[in-house]
Image: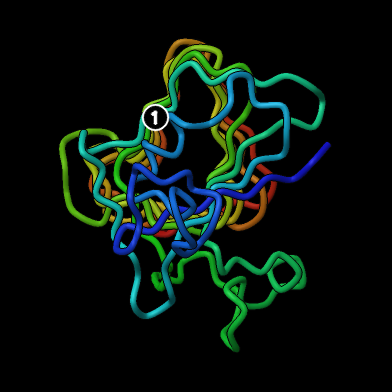
Amino acid sequence: MATVNYYVNPTTGNDSWDGTSPTFVSGTTGPKEHISAMIDALPDPIVDDVNINLAGTVGSPAIYLESAGKISLFGLRFLGAGARLTILPGIWNQLNYVGGGDPYGGSGSWDPTDGNKPCVIPCVEMDGVNRPINITGVTIGGIYTSSPGMKIGFGNMLILNYCAVGTFAIGAYVQGGGLMLVNSAFTRNRIGVLAENNAQIFCFGDNYIHDSLRYGFVVRWRSTLSFGVWWLNS
């Protein structure tokens, strides 16, 4: 199974390019401008281990403004045991992260609450997807909105790895789907996570629900919450 890399840059990208290079080369070879455009251009079905690499640096984060104000993960199909999709910063350093160090390759320490993420993306909606999707190392939100930061429909699974989520009325609204939190932080949301209708929430590592104005988790209507290491800050 091949690993295939695509690239998005909100400053220098162009949606008429193919997203196969982090910089413009010639013709149509260069980064996309919008994450949604890159997702729309993915093969159907996805048969490889696909990474969508986002431009951005710590201290000067790239702001991704989608035309619809959100990223729609709708109807993506995967074929083959190794087929998957990960959205992550291009500077992500997995070896540092696994070793407990700065996952962006600098000299900082590992800290799920660190607000210095190199990329800020808008709301995420997911439905009709037949395999879990991974979002790694980014901030979702940053400006208060009454929309959920994430909305996950029946039978879908979203994995958040080392992400920050805020500031929303609801950080994540999971309706019959699944959400896996790995070393992630929800800050300044009115409700951290709302799970309904047989939803499943899994927490692994150090996860923070901080400064929720009402509730950290609301889990109801036959939904479940499972966790490994759990930190609740209030």
Residue bearing the label numbered 1? 218
Determine the image quadrant of residue 206. bottom right
Q: Residues within 10 Å of mark 1 (few under 14, many from 20)?
A: some
Q: Residue at x 47, y 43 (%)?
A: 18
x and y percentages locating residue 28 in the rendered image = 44, 48
x and y percentages locating residue 163 in the rendered image = 48, 55
Determine the image quadrant of residue 115. bottom left
Element at label 1: strand
Where the C terminus falls, by quadrant?
bottom left
Name above or below for residue 171 compared with residue 182: above
x and y percentages locating residue 112 in the rendered image = 53, 64
Q: Residue at x 60, y 18 (%)?
A: 77
Q: Residue at x 26, y 42 (%)?
A: 66
Q: Is residue 86 left or right of residue 36?
A: right
Determine if residue 189 is in view. Answer: yes
Name above or below for residue 224 compared with residue 114: above
Q: Nearer the viewer, residue 94 or 111?
A: 94
Q: Mark 1: which amino acid?
A: Val
Q: Residue furthest front?
A: 27
Q: Residue at x 30, y 53 (%)?
A: 64
